[in-house]
Amino acid sequence: MNTRDTVSCIDGFLARYTPEIEAQLRDARARLRAHFPRGFELVFDNYNALVFGFSPSERSRESFLSIAGYPKWVTLFFLYGTALDDPQGLLEGKGKQVRGIRLKQAEDLDAPAVMALIRQAIAAHESALHAAPPLSTVVKAEVDRQRPRRPAAPA
């Protein structure tokens, strides 16, 4: 897929959301991308959410940080969140590995405590990222059957 097709494809994924969530997801994605001069942004339009994951390679299993859009919110995920030092207690989740922060607005990514978590996650993958090519975006998955991207209308 060429760059124009990738951009068009992502625009289509984002257009399924309400204007508010679309804008927040676009802004959060741009803020997160700014941390990655090298590596791969892997896009997954999955059953539950639209996910932009960051990885030193095109292999999905090497992703370590992502931003996901849901009908009512956007979440920043740390795929190895249990290994992070989180003195502010921002990370949510009870699984064996993944932790997340539900963003109230994209600017939350710039909060010092959130930036510290992002820097920790990147530092753990720094050597692999340094060896990666300049940042490129790859659409990895688009599933046909999806949950609605907009909240249900009130009855």
Image (tube, rainbow, N blue to C red):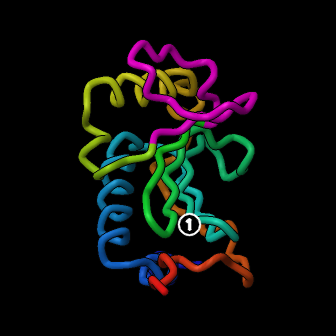
Q: Is residue 19 left or right of residue 7?
A: left
- What kind of secondary structure does the magenta stretch mostly adopt? loop
Q: Residue at x 32, y 24 (%)?
A: 113
What count of labels does the image hold? Answer: 1
Q: Is residue 128 left or right of residue 114?
A: right
Q: Measured along the vertical axis of the image, is residue 51 above or below residue 97?
A: below
Give the residue type at disc 1.
Leu
Quick one: label 1, few (<14), some, or many (20+) residues within 10 Å?
many
Q: Residue at x 72, y 33 (%)?
A: 95
Q: Residue furthest front?
A: 155
Q: Measured along the vertical axis of the image, is residue 112 above or below residue 52?
A: above
Q: How far across and how far down the image is residue 1, in percent? A: 59, 78
Q: How far across and how far down the image is residue 72, in percent? A: 44, 65
Q: How far across and how far down the image is residue 55, in percent? A: 59, 44
Q: Is residue 92 left or right of residue 31?
A: right
Q: Is residue 109 magenta?
A: no
Q: Nearer the viewer, residue 75 or 83?
A: 75
Q: Nearer the viewer, residue 48 or 43?
A: 48
Q: Which residue has dot 1 on it?
A: 50
Q: Residue at x 54, y 42 (%)?
A: 77
Question: Which stretch is magenta?
Answer: 79-101
Q: How far across and how far down the image is residue 43, in percent? A: 58, 63
Q: Measured along the vertical axis of the image, is residue 118 above or below residue 31?
A: above
Q: Nearer the viewer, residue 153 or 5?
A: 153
Q: Nearer the viewer, residue 150 or 29?
A: 150
Q: Secondary structure at mark 1?
A: strand
